[in-house]
Image (cartoon, rainbow, N blue to C red):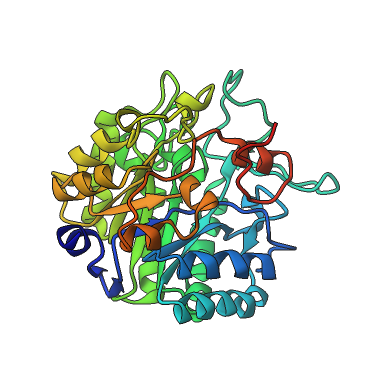
């Protein structure tokens, strides 16, 4: 047990932020927010995660601009009014020994608004007769792009005022930044589209906007989708180059995940039917290749359930930190259990009923055993 504790449970730094171990609660939408504000149910969830031994908690999707909303039950940070409740959340997490990063988010064309609203979702460019997306949306104007870039910067100021230890930009899973990166959804003919660097321009502008506002020491992370799940989308050959550019431009850590979702769970980050060790860590081949090229910390997410496999991944250098989402829904104290030496596999069976419950308007909880 000594070697395991020395490897996975020693502190690790991301720029100025020191974590008590290498375990991260990956950003997870919980449906607990009311009118964009932190609620007592969210406070209780984050307290349990912090008490349960996680080193870094990344919040669920937190909207930086009204045009980027995907749910009326997600958290917002586009006004100062949201700061006090967010500050209560960070204090509660810090009191229990964990660090907390806020995930800044814009849904892009995936945005959803109340029926009474006249708002239309916005994407990089309109794709006619798209078999993978049926929603109504329109292309962003140049001025609207800059407005969103600045919204990320203003959100970062609020996040720092609220006491967050870091920021993570959501650049995966088919949301706005993922839409800009993918050649399938970004067909612009101006400097925001075309070659890879142009499709990454919004990522760089957002980073620079945030860095100017929060200073040199504040950690800025990004969750990046390095391959799409649809034909004609982003290929890993470009995704790995994108990761290199992001690290070169200054992002302090990269969480490696999926890009545009295809049809079915197997073409997304939500792979199901993970029953054996060899089915776990399904993004490991991506993170390992990226890690071999970069000096910044790499976070690996995706189907991780077995402690011995996690230990192997970190020991061999395929990732620096381990991100968990679904296992911590069922067992928020999983990391503490492992730290104490009880190394049984996580109880999560990857049935995705938690996700399906959220899609039906339920709040986050393990649905295992229902039905």
Is residue 162 visible from the viewing direction of this image? no
Report which quarter residue 87 is drawn in: bottom right
Q: Nearer the viewer, residue 112 or 44?
A: 44
Residue at 48% in and 39% down: 173
Residue at 64% in and 73% down: 82
Q: Quadrant of the N terminus?
A: bottom left
Q: How many marks?
A: 0
Q: Nearer the viewer, residue 159 or 291?
A: 291
Q: Quadrant of the C terminus?
A: top right
Report which quarter residue 15 is drawn in: bottom left
Q: Nearer the viewer, residue 27 or 95?
A: 95
* Farthest right residue in view: 116
Position of residue 155 in the picture relative to residue 84 (left or right): left
Above or below for 207 versus 327: below
* Residue 238 percent coordinates (x, y): 27, 33
* Residue 18 percent coordinates (x, y): 28, 73
Position of residue 131 in the picture relative to residue 256 (left or right): right
Residue at 25% in and 45% down: 308
* Residue 47 percent coordinates (x, y): 54, 70
Is residue 255 visible from the viewing direction of this image? yes
């Amino acid at each position: 047990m000594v070697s395991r504790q020395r490897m996975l449970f020693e502190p690790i730094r991301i720029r100025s932020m020191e974590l008590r171990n290498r375990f991260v609660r990956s950003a997870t939408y919980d449906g607990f927010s009311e009118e964009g504000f932190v609620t007592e149910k969210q406070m209780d969830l984050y307290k349990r995660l912090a008490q349960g031994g996680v080193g870094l908690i990344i919040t669920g999707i937190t909207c930086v601009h009204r045009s980027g909303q995907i749910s009326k039950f997600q958290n917002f940070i586009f006004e100062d009014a949201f700061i006090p409740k967010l500050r209560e959340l960070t204090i509660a997490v810090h009191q229990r020994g964990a660090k907390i990063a806020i995930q800044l988010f814009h849904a892009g064309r995936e945005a959803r608004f109340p029926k009474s609203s006249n708002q239309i979702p916005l994407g990089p460019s309109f794709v006619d007769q798209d078999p993978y997306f049926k929603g109504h949306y329109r292309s962003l104007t140049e001025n609207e792009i800059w407005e969103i870039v600045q919204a990320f910067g203003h959100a970062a100021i609020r996040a720092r005022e609220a006491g967050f230890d870091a920021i993570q930009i959501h650049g995966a899973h088919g949301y706005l930044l993922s839409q800009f990166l993918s050649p399938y959804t970004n067909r612009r003919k101006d400097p925001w589209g075309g070659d890879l660097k142009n499709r990454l321009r919004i990522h760089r502008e957002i980073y620079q906007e945030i860095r100017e506002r929060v200073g040199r020491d504040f950690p800025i992370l990004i969750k990046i989708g390095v391959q799409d799940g649809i034909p004609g989308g982003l290929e890993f050959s470009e995704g790995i180059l994108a990761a290199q550019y992001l690290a070169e431009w200054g992002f302090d850590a990269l969480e490696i995940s999926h890009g545009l979702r295809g049809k079915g769970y197997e073409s997304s980050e939500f792979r199901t039917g993970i029953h054996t060790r060899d089915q776990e860590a399904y993004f490991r081949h991506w993170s390992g290749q990226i890690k071999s090229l970069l000096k910044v910390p790499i976070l690996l997410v995706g189907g991780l359930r077995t402690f011995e496999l996690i230990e192997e991944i970190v020991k061999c250098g395929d990732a620096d930190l381990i991100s968990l989402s679904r296992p911590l829904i069922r067992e928020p104290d999983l990391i503490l259990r492992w730290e104490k030496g009880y190394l049984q596999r996580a109880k999560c069976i990857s049935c995705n009923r938690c996700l399906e419950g959220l899609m039906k308007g339920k709040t986050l909880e393990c649905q295992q055993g229902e039905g």
